């Protein structure tokens, strides 16, 4: 079960290229640790695009050459080929 804090952390990261430590600092009033952020990432199934470094929901990423890649980067790769 996903907690509200985990959902809030995921929403803070999705659509950005912020680092996990940025989430720790943003939620410091909740005594969030690196492990809490990692737990939120796993629980909410978000991940980084290997090419652009932006956070996305897992279903928005596709495996390309063993890396998770977002739609926009896949489209750009297709244009480059």
Image (tube, rainbow, N blue to C red):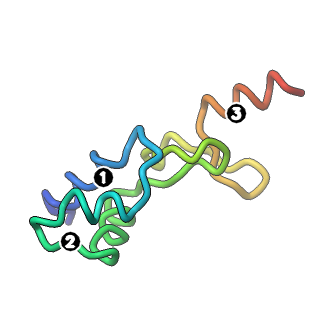
Q: Residue most toward the top?
A: 79
Quadrant, the C terminus: top right
Q: Quadrant of the N terminus?
A: bottom left
Q: Nearer the viewer, residue 66 or 18?
A: 18
Q: Residue 74, located in which quarter of the rendered image?
A: top right
Question: Please, is residue 24 above or below residue 67 in the view?
Answer: below
| Nearer the observer, 29 or 71 | 29
Residue 21 location (% of width, % of height):
37, 65
Label 2 element class: loop
The location of residue 28, given as percent across then percent down, is 17, 66
Q: Is residue 71 left or right of residue 16?
A: right
**Along the polypeptide, which appears first: circle 1 or circle 2?**
1
Query: Which image quadrant for residue 44?
Result: bottom left
Labels 1 & 2 near each other (Cβ < 8 A) = no
Q: Of helix, strand and loop, which one carries label 3?
A: helix
Foreground pick, 42 / 37: 37
- Residue 38, placed above or below residue 47: below
Local crowd at mark 1 within 10 Å, few (<14), some, or many (≥20)?
many
Q: Which mark is residue 10?
A: 1
Left of 78 or right of it: where is 11?
left
Percent position (x, y) of residue 43? Answer: 32, 64
In three-dimensional space, the C-alpha distance between marks 1 and 2, rounded to whole angstroms, equals 13 Å
Say which residue label 2 marks: 32
Residue at point 61% right, 29% down?
Answer: 72
Q: Secondary structure under badge 1?
A: helix
Report the side of 56 relative to 30 (left or right).
right
**Which of the two labelled residues, at mark 1 and mark 3, occupies the earlier sequence position?**
1
Q: Dot 3 surroundings within 10 Å: few (below 14), some, or many (20 or more)? A: some
Up/down of 9 relative to 77, above or below = below
Q: Which mark is residue 74?
A: 3
């Amino acid at each position: 079960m996903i907690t509200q804090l985990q959902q809030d952390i995921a929403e803070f990261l999705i659509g950005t290229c912020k680092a996990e430590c940025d989430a720790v600092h943003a939620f410091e009033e909740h005594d969030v640790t690196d492990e809490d952020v990692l737990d939120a990432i796993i629980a909410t199934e978000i991940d980084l695009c290997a090419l652009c470094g932006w956070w996305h929901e897992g279903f928005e990423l596709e495996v390309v050459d063993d890396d998770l890649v977002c739609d926009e980067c896949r489209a750009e790769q297709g244009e480059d080929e």
